[in-house]
Image (cartoon, coloured by chain):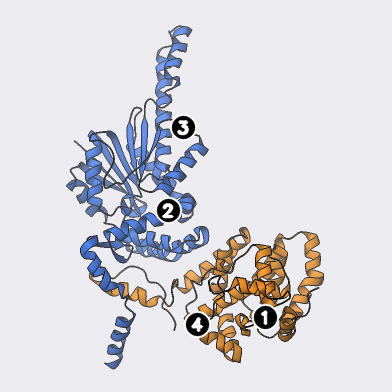
Chain colours: A orange, B blue
Amino acid sequence: GRARPSHSEPRGRDGRDWEEEEELWHQLYPGHIPTSPLQKALLAAGSAVMALYDPYRHDMVAVLGETTGCLALPNLRDKMKNHPEGYRILQERPCIRLSTLDMARLQGLPDGSLGREYVRFLEDNKVSPDTRMPPKFVDDEELAYVIQRYREVHDLMHTLLGMPTNMLGEVVVKWFEAVQTGLPMCVLGAAFGPVRLSTRKLQVLATELVPWAIRSGLNASCVLNIYYEQRWEQPVESLREELGIFPPP
Amino acid sequence: MAVGLCRCCCRALLARPAGALRALRGLAAGPETHFGFQTVTEEERREKIYQVFESVAKKYDVMNDSMTLGIHRVWKDILMHKMNPSPGTLLLDVAGGTGDIAFRFINYVRSVWERQLQRKLKNHQNLSWQEIFESYQKDKFNSLGNSQVVVCDINREMLKVGKQKAQHLGYTEGLSWVLGNAEELPFDDDAFDAYTIAFGIRNVTRIDLALQEAYRVLKPGGRFLCLEFSHVSNPLLSRLYDLYSFQVIPVLGEVIAGDWKSYQYLVESIRRFPPQEELKAMIEDAGFFKVDYENLNFGIVAIHSGFKL
């Protein structure tokens, strides 16, 4: 359902209890902060500037995604709904979290399998699936799940594309995601991310990596339609073929 | 008719089940009060406010500058000029957290003291060079003329930030940092010449108790000064102020400090705080005389003043 934006002053001391319930009624999911269109616009602008100014503010990238995704997210959700596996994901709402992953089992899987490579990726880059920000400013509970799923799948994208979490790797993944999802945040990240790269890296980016990422993104089916939790044993190569991602350069 | 009934059902279904629990807890945890626009017990309010300031402490000064576009510095300067402390004053700055008032106090008394010293020297130009040198020795370790400020705050994080700032800015003498609760100060009666509380009294749960404590620790003749957000009576300005407060400030909180909720609490708590006249009455109830207030920026901020006689 849709939410109403947050209001200003209470309507008088006796209206207090009524309006406290109103406030709760606005909250569509835990962590949801209802915002007015003006607030969303300000947030989008502010988070864009802050994300560029301080690339370590991952929360700002997240906020930018949420406030600008009002067209792309329903699109993604519909793509998921119209695909059998994607539809199942929307129904079952799986989460990729350290508490839900059996790390020991994944580590025991053969090299080259999705589970083993994913764990290797997490260890090599010293990241954890639990550091993803939960959505706050999406005014629809199902779309909030879609963006959360997108964030959780992002690390798997790194694994599938074979890209590390440095600035260069992130930009390449953003190009891929921009083509795949159409999220304005990905487009902006892809366009402005390279600003902070050296010329040598920019060259590699422009000549090899970006064209490959774009071609793969266009060719591949929607990455959100894969129930990754049920495919840990599948070899990465085979999953790449199934999706339509070309081998990395 | 049916829709209305359905709406009522929905509201009832979506109401937080803890409502009933809270009513039971209320019997144990104390009377109800407000936290922004929410209703909570006094115990919950104290906890929540502690958490707010614990989380904003590091970005407190940056946020103040961005939210008020630097104008908060002017307000604090005006407060200090109104106090017009003379060297030798012992000031208690409650909820003084990051030290803004304390540093201004030190700067003020230092410049007054230096001017006094200069005047003294000018009047004594027939002294021998030996006598002038000796007078320097006497005043060397006394650059503030024996003025002292005690910064008292309930929140450890805020005090930590304040101490770091003091070190960074080079404030070494005349400052003390004490952890304490405005509703129950750890000081003796009749101890201070002046008491200030800048943007702090709004966060106190029992304002009446804080005012009583202020009265207690002040010396007879001592002055109480409170700088706080207040109510704007001009209707047009009030609308603009509300728009800015509710639309822009939480966004600034999210972008700069990564903390929407604390700044939402801030703007809500300003609306909940008693207006100028009501606060004046509360200060008089605590026993202060010659209570008066001065509006700054059309009532966005007000300075209340009172004397213990």
What residue would you read off at disc 2?
B54
Q: Residue A210 versus residue B231: which sits nearer the camera?
A: A210
Secondary structure of the residue carrying tag 1 is loop
Measure the C-alpha gap from mark 4 to mark 3: 56 Å
> Residue B30 location, x and y as percent?
22, 60
What residue would you read off at disc 4?
A142
Secondary structure of the residue carrying tag 3 is loop
Q: Is residue B118 left or right of residue B193?
A: right
The residue positioned 22% from the left and 54% from the top of the image is B278
The residue positioned 73% from the left and 74% from the top of the image is A111
Do the residues under discs 1 and 2 have CB atoms within 8 angstroms? no
Q: Is residue B131 left or right of residue A222?
A: left
Which numbered disc covers residue A233? 1
Q: Is residue B68 visible?
A: no
What residue would you read off at disc 3?
B172
Residue type at tag 1: Glu
Residue type at tag 4: Glu
Q: Chain of mark 1?
A: A
Q: Are marks 4 and 2 on the same chain?
A: no
Q: How many marks?
A: 4
Measure the C-alpha gap from mark 3 to mark 2: 25 Å
Q: Are marks 4 and 3 on the same chain?
A: no
